[in-house]
């Protein structure tokens, strides 16, 4: 995680930012971030990355890259506004012992925002359509030696797959079906049994319910409404709701604010 010392909505690179440009409530953002960090730290080790002035979106560490075993691929951002973050992420991965793959400069890829390890099957859900290009998928598959399942986003509000899909422990899957094209929905339904799929309403998807952090049987997410929390609890999960309203202004929530560093390779 990266503290929100310099977080603000300094530009518009997704629909959520539109109309929210300018400083956020810095004190509220810090408190919300600290509550999330502390909550996750009760069940996992949290490593802190140094924030950098002038890079407001470094707080969203999910977009630093993606990790599998001791290998990593750093992001190469589509929006030019975020490209100055790239050298800091590459240096961090190298300094922390990860073997790093350099994508070609002409291919866009935005890390764990668009690459999520499934918790039931031996594959990586890999998104494209807005901020990651499908050309990146072959490079990821080769470097990680892992099956890719390419899924296409069609709603610009859900610009990364981690805004509308969250693999959960035990092979469950939290997702918002309308965010994907018909072929991608069919692929999800083919691979994940009906009893393991938890569909999220447009209202809760708009509150970033799918942008959740899952550690074992614990789930951390922004506040939701309706039957979603009882549905997760019925599956055996313990859910912690945390207000992350300041970060929603920039189009991110709990998952965007974290990067999982321990994705053990499967035999």
Image (spheres, helix red, strand yellow):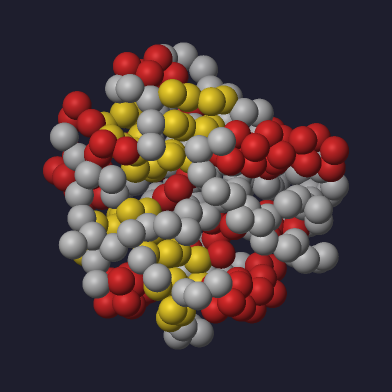
Residue 117 place in picture, x, y as percent: 33, 54
Along the horizontal axis of the image, is 170 left or right of 241?
left
- Relative height, residue 150 to residue 9 (above, below): below
Along the horizontal axis of the image, is 228 left or right of 118?
right
Visible residue check, residue 21? yes
Total marks drawn?
0
Front residue of this view, candidates 24 and 40: 40
Q: Residue at x 45, y 48 (%)?
A: 162
Visible residue check, residue 130? no
Q: Residue at x 53, y 25 (%)?
A: 240
- Relative height, residue 237 to residue 34 (above, below): above
| Residue 61 found in image quarter | bottom right
Residue 92 place in picture, x, y as percent: 60, 72
**Quarter of the image where the C terminus is located:** bottom left
Front residue of this view, candidates 9 and 122: 122
Q: Residue at x 19, y 26 (%)?
A: 195
Q: Residue at x 46, y 79 (%)?
A: 100
| Residue 143 found in image quarter | bottom left
Along the horizontal axis of the image, is 75 left or right of 146?
right
Front residue of this view, candidates 76 and 235: 235
Residue 168 place in picture, x, y as percent: 34, 38
Front residue of this view, candidates 128 and 220: 220
- Relative height, residue 136 to residue 30 (above, below): below
């Amino acid at each position: 995680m990266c503290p929100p010392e310099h977080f603000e909505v300094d530009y518009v690179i997704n629909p959520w930012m539109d109309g929210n440009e300018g400083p956020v409530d810095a004190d509220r953002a810090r408190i919300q971030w600290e509550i999330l960090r502390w909550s996750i730290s009760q069940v996992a080790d949290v490593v802190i990355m140094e924030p950098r002035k002038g890079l407001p979106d470094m707080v969203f560490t999910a977009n630093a890259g993606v990790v599998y075993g001791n290998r990593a691929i750093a992001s190469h951002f589509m929006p030019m506004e975020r490209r100055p973050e790239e050298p800091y992420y590459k240096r961090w991965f190298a300094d922390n012992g990860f073997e790093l793959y350099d994508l070609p400069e002409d291919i866009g890829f935005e890390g764990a925002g668009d690459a999520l390890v499934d918790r039931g099957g031996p594959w990586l859900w890999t998104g494209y359509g807005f901020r990651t290009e499908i050309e990146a998928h072959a490079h990821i598959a080769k470097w990680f030696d892992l099956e890719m399942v390419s899924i296409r986003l069609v709603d610009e509000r859900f610009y990364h797959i981690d805004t509308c899909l969250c693999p959960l422990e035990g092979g469950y899957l939290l997702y918002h079906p309308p965010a994907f094209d018909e072929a991608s929905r069919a692929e999800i339904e083919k691979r994940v049994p009906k009893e393991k799929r938890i569909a999220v309403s447009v209202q809760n998807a708009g509150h970033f319910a799918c942008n959740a952090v899952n550690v074992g049987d614990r789930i951390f997410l922004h506040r939701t409404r309706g039957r979603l929390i009882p549905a997760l609890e019925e599956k055996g999960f313990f859910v912690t709701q945390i207000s992350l309203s300041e970060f929603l202004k920039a189009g991110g929530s709990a998952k965007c604010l974290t990067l999982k560093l321990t994705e053990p390779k499967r035999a």
